[in-house]
Amino acid sequence: MMFGIGLLVLGAILLLVVAPIWIVAHYLSRWRAARGLSREDERRMAEMWEAARRMEERVTTLERILDAEAPGWRARREA
């Protein structure tokens, strides 16, 4: 009889205290692991960064050419 009550109390403690803490800790660790970028994401980000840098250089070059060839182009564009 006493053994059955002890098992019931132990089971209740496990279900009400240990299990929720265990579940929360499990999903927190999964969330932290998924929070960072994967190698593939880092590679893609580096490629996009490089493409944006090259595009910025091209725009700067085009603006320099337009400044030399058509000095008033900026004023015409804004009007």
Image (cartoon, grey):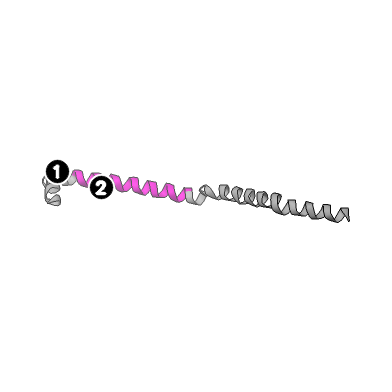
Q: Looking at the image, which is closer to me, 66 or 45?
A: 45
What residue lies at 18% left-to-right and 45% top-to-bottom? Answer: 65
Q: Quadrant of the N terminus?
A: bottom right
54 lies left or right of 43? left
What's the distance in space between the residues labelled 2 and 1, CA to CA?
A: 14 Å
Residue 77 percent coordinates (x, y): 14, 51
**Magenta stretch secondary structure, dominant:** helix
Name the residue beneath numbered marker 2.
59
SS class, disc 1: helix
5 lies left or right of 30? right
Quarter occupied by residue 15: bottom right
What residue lies at 85% left-to-right and 56% top-to-bottom? Answer: 4
Residue furthest out toward the right: 1
Is 24 magenta? The answer is no
The magenta region covers 42-64
Identify the mark nearer the N-term, 2 or 1.
2
Name the residue beneath numbered marker 1.
68
Question: Looking at the picture, which amino acid does disc 2 mark?
Answer: Val
Residue 33 percent coordinates (x, y): 57, 48
SS class, disc 2: helix
Q: How many marks?
A: 2
46 lies left or right of 22? left
What residue lies at 61% left-to-right and 51% top-to-bottom? Answer: 27
